[in-house]
Image (cartoon, rainbow, N blue to C red):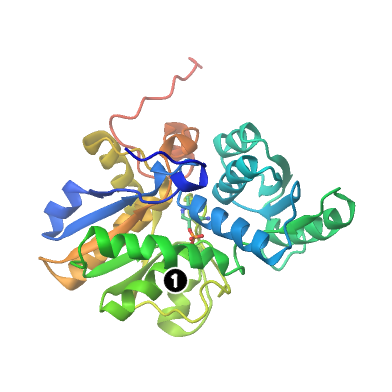
Amino acid sequence: MTIHSTLAAAIGNTPLIRLNAVSEATGCEILGKAEFMNPGQSVKDRAALFIIKAAIASGALKPGGTIVEGTAGNTGIGLALVGASMGFKTVIVIPETQSEEKKDMLRLAGAELVQVPAAPYRNPNNFVRYSERLAAALAKTEPHGAIWANQFDNVANRQAHIETTGPEIWAQTEGKVDGFICAAGSGGTVAGVGMVLQPKGVKVGLADPDGAALHSFYTTGELASNGGSIAEGIGQVRITKNLEGFTPDMSYNIPDAEALPIVFDLLHDEGLVLGGSSGVNIAGAVRMAREMGPGHTIVTILCDYGTRYQSKLFNREFLESKDLPVPDWMAPSTRAIP
Ligand code: PMP
């Protein structure tokens, strides 16, 4: 038995779970790293911990200080929980379009929420850019100062995956891993794991949802995007500092119509409760398996727990409103008689 003396020590060392249906369909071993088993139920606990540790080490984050961040939610949940365990306050700037479940979880975790309209990065009121200005203002007024976590361009984020996720995957597969693939939000996961596994001869792929510009960048050199995705937390349109210095070996554009049925099947048939980005990742792993051929082992990331999206991804009316596939078993909506 291991006793963790802090919450931070309970982050990481997540299991690898064989995804049976997609493994059988491709003749590959497709394995999911169960990041939803982290204390904040997402992969972003790792980045949150490393960002906080780096800010303490540099002296920027002082005892009782405030952590400010712009986030689709999961990084904020990680920062709020790790922050609470270490005596820091968190102020989270989130686009109002993100799921209510994530916002509730942030409030529950003690974060102060600032909701802003969804706006592109070039707009100064974009959630990331707003959070940078808010952090600068709070640094002057908070009694113990404030820092901006800056997950997108703070490479302490990627360092978490260089020091933990990448080595864990290598050790758990005993080096018998041929491919790794996931989507990018900040890019910390794909670039950090990629930087560990590529030098060992593992092919590293990027799964890019509609609306993101990275697939276009890595295949044509142009940052261009089309459409959009309901998958939250991914869909990057610029080369963040966490992505700099990393180039995937292969990349695939994954539409929601390809990713979501995988999430529904895994829930119904394999008991895995996942969010939309996990579906994009697994669809990417399937594409990679088909490109590499049978007999390979491919690892991907199960980014967060699906209850976080009950009102959207697992809601028939929401899916119908977006013209997305609805599984037969999903509860029908109760319509009033006209
Ligand atoms: N999936 C979800 C649900 C996320 O919240 C995030 C992070 N925003 C990611 C995937 C992508 O992780 P990363 O930031 O390491 O690229």
Outermost residue on the top side: it is 337
Looking at the picture, tell me which residue is in the foreground, 28 or 189. 189
Quarter holding residue 164: bottom left
Looking at the picture, tell me which residue is in the foreground, 132 or 226. 132
Please indicate whether residue 251 sits to the left or right of residue 185 in the image: left
Looking at the picture, tell me which residue is in the foreground, 211 or 27. 27
Q: Find residue 233 and report its horizontal and vertical position in percent.
A: 52, 53
Outermost residue on the right side: it is 141
Dot 1 amino acid type: Ala
Quarter holding residue 246: bottom left
Q: Check the image and report above or below for 267 versus 225.
A: above
- Provide the secondary structure element on which disc 1 rests: helix
**Residue drawn at the location 23% of the way across and 38% of the way down:** 270
Q: Check the image and report above or below for 189 versus 19.
A: below
How many numbered discs, if any?
A: 1
Q: Find residue 274 and report its horizontal and vertical position in percent.
A: 37, 42
Q: Find residue 18 and report its horizontal and vertical position in percent.
A: 20, 49
Please indicate whether residue 277 sits to the left or right of residue 143 in the image: left
Q: Find residue 56 and report its horizontal and vertical position in percent.
A: 67, 59
Res 74 seen here: yes
**Residue drawn at the location 28% of the way across and 32% of the way down:** 328
Res 257 seen here: no
Mark 1 neighbour class, 10 Å CA radius: few under 14, some 14 to 19, many 20 or more: many
Outermost residue on the bottom side: it is 221
Return the residue at label 1.
191
**Residue drawn at the location 75% of the way across and 46% of the way down:** 64
**Residue drawn at the location 18% of the way across and 63% of the way down:** 297
Quarter holding residue 283: bottom left
Ligand 1 near label 1 (Cβ, under 8 Å)?
Answer: no
Q: Quadrant of the N terminus?
A: top left
Q: Check the image and report above or below for 68 versus 158.
A: above
